[in-house]
Structures are given as structure tokens and as C-alpha cells.
């Protein structure tokens, strides 16, 4: 029986080769030409966390995608102990394939601390129970996809997503850059708070890049669009239980020079802001083949 979440948990349980050296694998999915960015973010965060004491949680990470990851070979993660301070711990992680950097990440961890608090309110949107799931919507339009791609297009996913204002994948119209999606890991995964942060980091690379396409009536199905994540930053504001629904409220205040800038605020169902995300992505028109 298929268990996408079990496969994801196995993916994040990277192998320790040496004290600060780890090896991660990629899913065996022939349709993928490159490694999903969220996978590398999450695996690098796991590597960093395994070198930090359990009383410190990640509060921010900043990452750059340098080269496309090759899904056919393992990824080596090398952790550098940048600083171990009284309240904060900093790690740098370099991901390597074929002898070259494909990705690097800096992450900061902090001991729990009380302080003043404020936050913006969660947007008023329909609850997840009132919306169709991603898989349900894809099954409805699967006849528009080439038969050899339908299984991959409609398969069960490790992350469940419900889009508040979905675009027509094949005939999109220009729309607002404001975009909201409910998402969660597709089943219970236990209580480890570090794991839930890594799962949220993994899923934070979903939907965000496409936010900048919306004002231009573009989706990832458009053959003239070339897109890829260039960098990614997350600030974790509170503990996360990602087996519960969270709202990913996104916008794209700028696109130009072949790039789009996209932001996201992640709220739990109680309306608490648990994380903020920012990303620049490649948004370039493909050159016609000569």
C-alpha cells in the first residue's frame, strides 16, 4: 500500500557518515529532472539540527540554490559549526553533488525565551473543509494531461493542499498576486517538534514560486515559462504541529529582470503566525528552439 508520508519521513532520516557529514537520498521518481528544492532545504535543516542540542529550536534559515540537484545520486551535506553561543547556535550547511556545491544554508537556533509579542491577523478565508483538495481537482482534469503523465499528476501526495483561489492550469487568466493555500502533512507523524519544523520547511517551497506567475496568467504547465527557486528564507516564530491544517498566505510584490519576489505568512488554525517565508525565483521566458 502506498504511504507517501512514510516515504517522506524516510527521505528526511538522512544517514550520518561522520560527525558533521551526512548523506541524503532522493525519491525514485523518473519524471523528476531535478531535486525538489524543499527536499534539499529540509534535509539540510535535519543535518544542522543533528549537531545542535535538543533545547534549541531553529528560528531562521537562509538558503541559496546554486545548481540543479541530480535525483539519481546521493547528496552529501557538510555542516560547519559557525558558533555556539549562550542563547544562539549557528550552523552552515553545504550540499554537494558531483564534487560541486548545489546548495548552501545558514541556520540559527535559539533557546526558548519570553518576550513582548504582536502579529498581523490571519486573512479571512474559507476553512479547509469547504475546499477541494489538490488531488481531487487534478483527477477532475486528468484527461487534459498526456496519458503517460496521469499517474504522476494524480497520485497521492505527502503534503495535502487545498487552494483558496486556484487558477485553471491549462487556461489561466491574470489574477491577483495574493494567494492562499491550506496545507499539512497528509497523516499523523508523532510529536517531535524538530521533525514538524523540517516538514514545514519542506512544504514551504510548494506554491510560493507560482505566486509571482499569477498576475501574468501563467502556470507551470505553460511551455514558454522557465522557473526555478533561486533562494529561500524561513523565520520560525512558534512551535509547529504540521499534521494540523495551516494557512499559507502568499503574495508577490515584484517581478522583473527575469525574477519574481514572493512572500508567505504561515498561520495555524487558531490564527497564530508560526512562520514567515521569502523567496526569489527565476521567471524567464524560454527562448524558442532554433
Image (cartoon, rainbow, N blue to C red):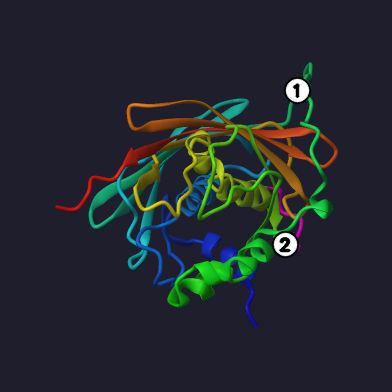
Residue 207 part of the magenta-drawn span: no
Q: Splitting the image into 4 quarters, where does residue 282 fall? A: top left
Q: Splitting the image into 4 quarters, where does residue 31 fall? A: bottom left
Q: Is residue 74 above or below residue 84?
A: below
Q: Is residue 158 above or below residue 68?
A: below
Q: Earlier in the sequence, mark 1 or mark 2?
A: 1
Mark 1 vs 2: CB contact within 8 A: no
Q: Which element carries disc 2, helix, strand or loop?
A: loop
Residue labelled with disc 1 = 120
Residue in the picture at 66% in, 61% down: 137
Label 1 – label 2 distance at C-alpha? 29 Å
Q: Is residue 144 above or below residue 286?
A: below
**On the rendered structure, is 7 left or right of 136?**
left
Q: Splitting the image into 4 quarters, where does residue 60 fall? A: top right
Between 106 and 30, the residue placed more toward the observer is: 30
The residue mark sitting in front, 1 or 2, is 1
Secondary structure mostly seen in magenta is loop
How packed mark 2 is, by other alpha carbons closer than 10 Å (few <14, some 14-19, many 20 or more), is: some
Give percent across and percent down for residue 193.
Answer: 71, 48
Range covered by the magenta-colored residues:
187-193
Residue at the farthest left position: 290
Residue in the picture at 70% in, 62% down: 186
Of the 4 image quadrants, the one containing the N terminus is bottom right
Give percent across and percent down for residue 106.
Answer: 45, 35
**Residue 107 seen in render:** no
Q: Tell me, for residue 189, which label it has, or none.
A: 2
Give percent across and percent down for residue 21.
Answer: 40, 53
Residue 189 part of the magenta-drawn span: yes
**On the rendered structure, is 251 left or right of 123?**
left
Residue at the farthest right position: 270
How packed mark 1 is, by other alpha carbons closer than 10 Å (few <14, some 14-19, many 20 or more), is: few
Amino acid at each position: 500500500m502506498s504511504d507517501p508520508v512514510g516515504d517522506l519521513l524516510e527521505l528526511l532520516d538522512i544517514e550520518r557518515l561522520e560527525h558533521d557529514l551526512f548523506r541524503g537520498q532522493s525519491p525514485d521518481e523518473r519524471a523528476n529532472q531535478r531535486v525538489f528544492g524543499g527536499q534539499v532545504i529540509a534535509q539540510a535543516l535535519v543535518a544542522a539540527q543533528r549537531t545542535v542540542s535538543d533545547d534549541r529550536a531553529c528560528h531562521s534559515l537562509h538558503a541559496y540554490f546554486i545548481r540543479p540537484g541530480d535525483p539519481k545520486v546521493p547528496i552529501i551535506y557538510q555542516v560547519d559549526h559557525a558558533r555556539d553561543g549562550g542563547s544562539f547556535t549557528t550552523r552552515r550547511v553545504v550540499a554537494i553533488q558531483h564534487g560541486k556545491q548545489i546548495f548552501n544554508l545558514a541556520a540559527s537556533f535559539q533557546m526558548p525565551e519570553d518576550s513582548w509579542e504582536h502579529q498581523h491577523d490571519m486573512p479571512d478565508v474559507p476553512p479547509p473543509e469547504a475546499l477541494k483538495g489538490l488531488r481531487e481537482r487534478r483527477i477532475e482534469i486528468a484527461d487534459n494531461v498526456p496519458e503517460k503523465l496521469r499517474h504522476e499528476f494524480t497520485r497521492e501526495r505527502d503534503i495535502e493542499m487545498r487552494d483558496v483561489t486556484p487558477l485553471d492550469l491549462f487556461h489561466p487568466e491574470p489574477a491577483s498576486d495574493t494567494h492562499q493555500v491550506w496545507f499539512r502533512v497528509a497523516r499523523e507523524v508523532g510529536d517531535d517538534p524538530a521533525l514538524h519544523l523540517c516538514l514545514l520547511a519542506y512544504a514551504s517551497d510548494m506554491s510560493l514560486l507560482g505566486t509571482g506567475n499569477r498576475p501574468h496568467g501563467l502556470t507551470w504547465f505553460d511551455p514558454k515559462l522557465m522557473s526555478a527557486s533561486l533562494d529561500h528564507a524561513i523565520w520560525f516564530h512558534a512551535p509547529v504541529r504540521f499534521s494540523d491544517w495551516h494557512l499559507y498566505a502568499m503574495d508577490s510584490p515584484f517581478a522583473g529582470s527575469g525574477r519574481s519576489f514572493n512572500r508567505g505568512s504561515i498561520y495555524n488554525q487558531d490564527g497564530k503566525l508560526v512562520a514567515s517565508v521569502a523567496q526569489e525565483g527565476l521567471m524567464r521566458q524560454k527562448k524558442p528552439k532554433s
